[in-house]
Image (cartoon, grey):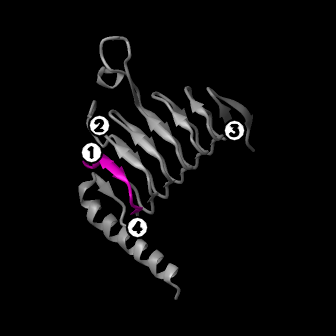
Amino acid sequence: MSTLDLLISAQRGRDLVFSKLAARGFASFGSSSRILLPTRLSGAQHIAVGDRVLIGAGSWLIVPEQKSPGPNIIIGDRVRMNQTSISGVHRVEIEEGVALARGCYISDHSHGFDDPDRFVRDQPLSRVAPVHIRRGAWLGHNCVVLPGVTIGAGAVVGANSVVTSDIPDRTVAAGAPARVLRELP
């Protein structure tokens, strides 16, 4: 076994121990799910994680405040994410088998920016609406999903897309804003 193999094994062991210990702080956490460090967590008690989920290094799961009873972020079985940011105050639901490529951002809320005398980050939330990503969807690199959106089962969203409205089942969508390009068989 090479030095690199030993280091990778140690890293996997560290992530396994972290996952087992952190699981107690979540609303629920599947026994075979893993969190790879470093990951930022806030409001984990309002986050439900299914079984065999992989939360990749550099991901952020955040419930900054609750606008409805939780869990406010629900991640279904076998979801894979890598450097993904999910922020939920009402409800972000990601069903089973969804793949989130590197750099995706998903939020069920946005800040207001009407008051010129206050920083945008200090203004109240102006839009809060649930986000639902249905089973087996795939979101490409750097996708942004805005409040109130449903992405259909088996849908594919192209890299760098900004999803501002619903995407039907079994379609390919891309762009900013994302629009349906074709249907899948």
Q: Tag 2: Cα neighbours inside 10 Å, few (<14), some, or many (≥20)?
A: few
Q: Which quarter of the figure has residue 165?
A: top right
Name the residue beneath numbered marker 3. 172
Q: Does 120 sit above or below residue 162?
A: above
Q: Earlier in the sequence, mark 1 or mark 3?
A: 1
Name the residue beneath numbered marker 1. 43
Q: Secondary structure at mark 3?
A: strand
Q: Which quarter shows the C terminus?
A: top right
| Residue 140 place in picture, x, y as percent | 61, 45
Closest to the camera, between mark 3 and mark 2, is 2
Q: Secondary structure at mark 4?
A: loop
- The magenta segment is 34-48
Q: Does 128 sit above or below residue 95?
A: above
Give the distance between the C-alpha atoms of the residues marked 2 and 1, in whole angstroms.
Answer: 7 Å
Closest to the camera, between mark 2 and mark 4, is 2
Q: Earlier in the sequence, mark 3 or mark 4?
A: 4
Closest to the camera, between mark 4 and mark 1, is 1
In the picture, measured across the screen, residue 138 lies left or right of residue 92, that is right
Residue 43: say if magenta. Answer: yes
Q: Tag 1: Cα neighbours inside 10 Å, few (<14), some, or many (≥20)?
A: many
In percent of the image, x 41 and y 39: which residue is there?
92
Q: Secondary structure at mark 1?
A: loop
Name the residue beneath numbered marker 4. 32
Q: Does 77 sit above or below residue 185?
A: below
Residue kind at label 3, given as amino acid type: Val
